[in-house]
Amino acid sequence: MFKQLEEESYLKKYSRTDLVKKLTFYMTELNVLHPFREGNGRIIREYFRILLESLGYYINFTKNNKTSYFKAMIDSPYDSENLLKFIQNNLRNI
């Protein structure tokens, strides 16, 4: 996954719409690949926080919407629509 991300120039060439789709894909896949439940979310959020910062974005993970994010991540291997909507609604410019 990380090699593929590198080959995609760490998502630098994508429009905001396509970036949301790619983030949904990568966040879901990395969540599935990680063998342990504990720590998945924190690691994935931190990785993409750093990546998005280099692109001029951040995802707003306020206390009020963390529950929505957790549910979307749990559902994402089977249905990633909620995660896509979460990212769409919470992706902000720095």
Image (cartoon, helix red, strand yellow):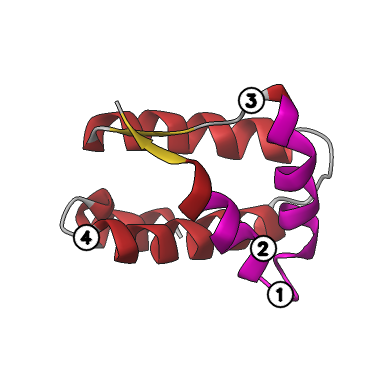
Query: For mark 4, what is the residue?
Result: 15
Q: Which residues are magenta?
A: 64-87
Q: For numbered disc 2, what is the local secondary structure?
A: helix
The structure residue drawn at horizontal position 78% and vertical position 64%, both measured from the top left corner, is 75
Q: Tell me if 82 is positioned left or right of 22 in this view.
A: right
Alpha carbons under labels 1 and 3: distance apart: 23 Å
Task: Relative to 79, say whether 91 is above or below.
Answer: above
Task: Relative to 49, say whether 79 is above or below.
Answer: below
Alpha carbons under labels 1 and 4: distance apart: 23 Å
Q: Comparing marks 1 and 3, which lies closer to the viewer?
A: 3
* 86 magenta-colored: yes
**Going from the N terminus, do you reach mark 2 or mark 4 first?**
4
Type of amino acid at the residue the image marks with label 1: Asp
Alpha carbons under labels 2 and 4: distance apart: 20 Å
Residue contact between numbered discs 1 and 4, judged by CB atoms under 8 Å: no
Task: List x then y, in percent, for residue 49.
Answer: 44, 31
Q: Residues within 10 Å of mark 1 (few under 14, many from 20)?
A: few
Q: Tell me if 76 is positioned left or right of 7 in this view.
A: right
Q: For numbered disc 1, what is the local secondary structure?
A: loop
Type of amino acid at the residue the image marks with label 4: Ser
Q: Tell me if 32 is positioned left or right of 27 in this view.
A: right
Query: For mark 3, what is the residue?
Result: 62
Q: Tell me if 81 is positioned left or right of 67 in this view.
A: left
Type of amino acid at the residue the image marks with label 2: Asn
Query: For mark 1, what is the residue?
Result: 79
The structure residue drawn at horizontal position 48% and vertical position 34%, both measured from the top left corner, is 47
Q: For numbered disc 3, what is the local secondary structure?
A: loop
Task: List x then y, in percent, for residue 57.
Answer: 32, 35
Query: For mark 2, what is the residue?
Result: 82
Type of amino acid at the residue the image marks with label 3: Thr
* In the image, farthest residue toward the left: 13
